[in-house]
Image (cartoon, helix red, strand yellow):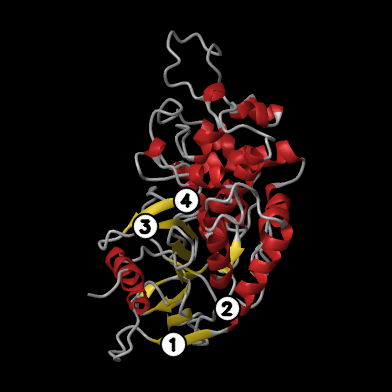
Amino acid sequence: MDDEHMPTHTALVRLASAMTALTCAVTVSAGSAGSGTAARSPVQDLVSPRTVPGAAQLSQDAHGVRFHTAGVADVRTGRPIRPTDRFRVGSITKTVIATVTLQLAAERKLDLDDPVSTHLPAATAALLPCPGDSDSDSDSRDPGCRITVRQLLTHTSGLFSYTDDRAFFRRFFGPGFTAHRFQTHKPDALVRTALSHPPHAAPGERYRYSNTDYLLLGMVIRQVTGHSYATEAHRRVIAPLRLTGTSFPGTRAGLPSPHGRAYTTTGATPGATPGATTGTTTGTTTGTTTGNSRTADATYLNPSSAGAAGELVSTLPDLNRLFGALLRGTLLPAPELRQMRDTTDSYGRYGMGLFPVRLPCHRTLWGHNGEISGSYVQTLGTTDGRHLVSYRVNSDAPVDAAAERALLTAEFCPKA
């Protein structure tokens, strides 16, 4: 973390090779919720017979790599979740987008305090109202030209999140999911949906999680580099770290093999939380019955509704490798990594594509979570990136917060 220079390509290759060797030596355990066995893993408490068919956890530290699974990856076949299964990671996409943006800042291809309008296509920049565009005597809540790249990264832009638009949510993540799940969305159209609502606050005034912020950052990356955010992320992050299970699907509805199934539930209410996610929950009331709850298969969907805010597909080993490299300073110079973990602007809630999780044993972890129809995941690690955990469920039903806290406490807090 204190290195003053960007790591070389050779260093990245050495890291990837070492991580590949490490993840080959995995201790595997499996169980089912309510098994009552002495070796019961906390991951089993993430499974619910009514709403969450399966869960898995991959941990690694100086003692090795451990994989635990509970429930099933597919309610029809009963097969368990496997370590290399591909799944949608939702807003963990933001960590990758933030990393690429900060790399561009380190290369002086942009400045974090630049007005974002200077790094957007003209048509999109024109959508952002600037002070003086209206006859209003006050522009105190006018976002437009005063929004900076930094404010997008820290969710302090004040812009309305397009996924909070009620009609949009109901159509694509709520009751209309089945009918609209394969529809393609253009980023500028999603931005227009967001800007049809007034901003929540003036730029820099307060923290409020907004998927619109990272949609715009994806457009900034294209404008600055001449390449899509997916191309730049692959070149700068995915390929150097050899994240072979990680990809940006674009508009492709399927998941690469191997993969299990994804299940969506109904009745959830949209709402952002620290590290909140694209899409949030819900689907349709038709589909497979799991226990006493009706769920729908959400394995296939067009993720362009999430875009740069949440379209990524990955695996548990890749997520640990990604966050380990990031937290150790392999992907960013020390000044940019410090900025990524600076939560001053959000009053301790969010940095730039990372957020802190403080445990009862007074340890602070860094990472991100992600949710999209049919999937929830979180990856967290120690500040030095040497102790990591990624865990996931194959459902978008709300995960029990106490069960998550117990899992993290068991993993990171030393026993008395």
Mark 4 and mark 3: Cα distance apart in space: 25 Å
User: Left or right: where does residue 225 sit relative to residue 130?
Assistant: right
Give the mark, 2 or 3, whose residue is nearer the N terminus.
Answer: 2
Foreground: disc 1 or disc 2: 2
SS under mark 4:
loop
Say which amino acid is labelled 4. Leu
Residue that appears at 34% across and 75% down: 48
- Residue ID for mark 3: 268
Say which mark, if any, is on residue 29.
1
Which residue occupies the extreme left position in the image?
416
Give the mark, 1 or 4, whose residue is nearer the N terminus.
Answer: 1
Density class for disc 3 (Cα within 10 Å; few <14, some 14-19, many ≥20) is some
Say which mark, if any, is on residue 23.
2
- Residue ID for mark 4: 354
Find residue 192 and report its image quarter: top right
Rendering coords of residue 287 (x, y %): 48, 72
How many numbered callouts?
Answer: 4
Foreground: disc 4 or disc 3: 4
Does residue 61 sit above or below 269 in this rendering?
A: below
Tell me if label 4 and label 3 are in contact, CB under 8 Å. no
Say which amino acid is labelled 3. Ala
Mark 2 and mark 3: Cα distance apart in space: 36 Å
Density class for disc 2 (Cα within 10 Å; few <14, some 14-19, many ≥20) is many
Say which amino acid is labelled 1. Ser
User: Left or right: where does residue 309 sit relative to residue 220?
Assistant: left
Does residue 90 sit above or below 215 in this rendering?
A: below
Residue situated in front as seen by the camera: 356 or 49: 356
Give the mark, 1 or 2, whose residue is nearer the N terminus.
Answer: 2
Does residue 361 sit above or below 294 in this rendering?
A: above
Give the mark, 1 or 3, whose residue is nearer the N terminus.
Answer: 1
Foreground: disc 2 or disc 3: 2
Tell me if label 2 and label 3 are in contact, CB under 8 Å. no
